[in-house]
Image (cartoon, grey):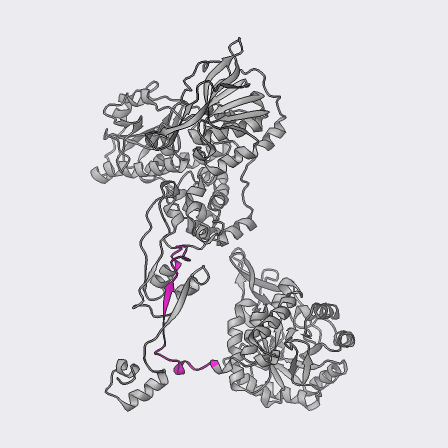
Amino acid sequence: MVNDPAPKLPLEQLEKNFADINPPLNPGQALEEASRCLFCHDAPCIKACPTEIDVPLFIRQIITGNLRGSAKTILEANILGQSCARVCPTSVLCEGSCVLNAQGRKPVEIGKLQRYAVDPIVASGVQLFQAGPDNGYRVALIGAGPASLSCATELRKRGYAAVIFDSNPQPGGLDTYGIAAYKMRAAETLKEIDLVLGLGVEINSGVAVGKDISIPDLEREYDAVFIGIGLGETDALGIPGEHLNGCVDALSFIEETKSKRFDQVTIARRIAVVGGGNTAIDVVTAARRLGAEEVFMVYRRTSEEMSAFDYEYELAKNDCVTFVWQAAPSRVIDDGHGHVAALECLRTQPAAKDARGRSSYVPIPGSEFRLEVSMVVKALGQKRKLDFLQQITNLKLKNGCIVVDQTMRSSNPRYFAGGDCVNGGGEVVDAVAHGKKAATGIHQRLEATHGRKAHA
Amino acid sequence: MPDLSIDFCGVRSPNPFWLASGPPSNTAYQVMRAFDAGWGGAVWKTIGEPIINTASRYGSIDLKNERMIGLNNIELISDRSVEVNLREIAEVKKRFPKHTVIASLMVESKQATWHDIVRRAEDSGADLLELNFGCPHGMSERGMGAAVGQVPEYATMITQWVKEVARTPVIVKLTPNVTDIAHMAVAAKKGGADAVSLVNTFNSIVGVDLDNFAPRPAVAGRGSHGGYCGPAVKPVALHMVSSVAKTVDIPISGIGGIGNWRDAVEFMLLGSTSVQVCTAAMHYGFRIVEDMIAGLDNYLEEKGFASAMDLVGKATPHVDDWGNLDLNYKIVAKIDAVKCIGCNLCYIACEDGAHQCIRVDERPQGDLRHGVNLRHVPVVLEDECVGCNLCALVCPVPDCITMAEIDTGRPHMSWKQLQEARGKSPNCSMEELLAGGK
């Protein structure tokens, strides 16, 4: 419930506002783009991809008209190749490493080509992979996000039973609920997950481990457990008034845009978003596209220090967002009826560098100013799910993240982990890479060490 | 201003760029458009007893995004009557008296028929005659085209028939679908030909439809071999022109994959006086001649040639037998580490496809987020390098890999010289002989 909601735009307009920002290539464009690939030896794009997709090969397969083979090359290395094609920060990964950059040329648009190859196969529902012969081992995976989906896929290929538990109504984790709608729709993510289901991965949605099924039960029934629970809710601002109606969490807001019709999402006429990361960008752009008239992005530091990628910043600029640099929220102001009336901020100034070497900014006393908004969105970063993780015995954490070895194995030998709960928040492709590595780690610990398990 | 005009068997042409006999020179309308665009001459689409064509007629091959690097056709000679074609030639000559119009002829192998068509073609005002002894499909099954051009005695005989009545110079167009095209040029000259033009198209099947197994171009699910041309055939044509130029003293009109002034200059340097273009005009239209003219003009000026004729045969003395090449000449690859973009294509080409003389470290796993440098510059093992050029050929960066000459201090020693030296000094090792007996 927010005060002063923005007038609802017609659904047709909303659909237009949230239309694919990176429309797929047509066959002519794809051939032209694919033809630019040099087919490098020991290609840097492969090395710069956490999942090591054989990029030159899949591009060559596009050129030869072997689109199915191309999709298989991609999905073999990365079962969420469709999501990654759309959400990967390619400018710092494959495309950033493309040798054409060194020649002052535009890198090959690998992300778009990947999408060109994968989209039709995923949409067709063709099952490209087969599960391995049953080896008798059972692995439970907690969370149905990219890390678990990837891990489960690799386990099934090796003949393991893979059973995922997830408390959300739909699988996919942030891949389903957290990707800006103009990049990918939830229905597309779910279609992609059909590839995983087709391998015989069992996904139990709406089942919370620790509540609906106990951790000891899990440990008893499964030979290994993979933790891919991601992170928790957004960090609190830690200021008075945070409880007011209209003060919301960024991820819940994005989730709303991903799980409801756009005309069922209410946005305030004027809104402030606190944070400088990619999620903050997702929120400000979504807010503008939903019809908010004035969107403030409030960030403690300057534009150069924002953790959002440059191309994300560009998106926000193009959406006419008002940036409020060097400002720290100090109070959410009540309208007298328990609703947000304004966000009070203080100007900040640079101070000594923090422990991570980032320049820190401190509020300037007496510099208060107000942003008249009826909605405040917190996009500061996510909390660790400590309550859950601490229920597992002997699970070593560092800064709230699970400590793992090279094989993604935790300090508790039964548990492996990957994704955001390990790296503190990364890309989908990082989570997929973790999941693959963990599957190899689990396999090494189980079948590779003990042989196949006799059936009961 | 260099003189672009040429003298071809006594016929002056405004420039060496002629349309080859084919679809672009089918009608007066097209030829006049071509002359307006700047073409110096046109060889009319072959005139003879009208034929009936099929649909479809052309098939091509693409290279990645590049369309039509090679074109195949199963079209025959003109499907219009001799009268109409000759009347149109007369019209064109009237409007463009200074341009060169060449009548391409093909009739059944009877002396009287040839005499008749030659007289009629000359009456139309054609400057030159070209005898089509090359068409590789359709016509050859009827005893014409390549059926004549592949048998030296027939080629000589029919050329003689033509020369019995011809008052204008006669060009014999040669088919490349023979073992030695120079042999056919000798036969043409023997028959009295004033010039030869080459090459006609190559026998080809340009591709097969993977769904219905029909060769392309398909006519109701079936296909037939056709004639192949376009950029892909240029190197083969260049060799054939060169071979004829070295064997027979006869003017040559060069044909085969010419699409720009560079191609044209190459054909002229190897012995062509004029060049003929078809596929490029079919692909891009007549206006490509604008740059052919401008490019040739620039080239002549830059190189200090007064006339386009000065180019003819300039490269011929440089074409030699392999046995005369210097075995002591040495070059090695040099990679410019600053220009190198790290694609490592030179490495893999040398490793898998050549002589294993380039080394490069394997790239680490990592990305820009972690500041990992993935640009790895390969290194040439110069002592191992055989100077084959492959790395420089695959390198996508201009002037990044150059082949540097190494002074071995050894004398010129060709294979032929080496054989002689071996005969004189049978007890010397090959290495000693190469070093000049030292």
Q: Can you tell which quarter of the image residue B18 is in?
A: bottom right
Magenta span contains residue B224: no
Residue A354 x/y as whole percent: 34, 29
Magenta part of the protein: which range? B318-345
Of residues B201 and A49, which is closer to you in this image? Answer: A49
| Residue B226 visible, this angle | no
Quarter of the image containing the C terminus of chain B? bottom left
Work out which residue is located at the far left of the displayed protein and give it. Answer: A450
For residue B12, side relative to residue A395 (left or right): right
Residue A304 x/y as whole percent: 45, 35
For residue A135, side relative to residue A98 (left or right): left
Of residues A429 and B135, which is closer to you in this image? Answer: A429
Our reading of the magenta stretch's main secondary structure is: loop
Q: Is residue A127 above or below residue B222?
A: above
| Residue B118 visible, this angle | yes
Q: Is residue B376 above or below residue B316?
A: above
Of residues A376 and A179, which is closer to you in this image? Answer: A376
Magenta span contains residue B335: yes
Quarter of the image containing the N terminus of chain B? bottom right
Q: Can you tell which quarter of the image residue A364 is in?
A: top left
Residue A21 x/y as whole percent: 54, 37
Name the residue: 60% across, 71% down.
B298
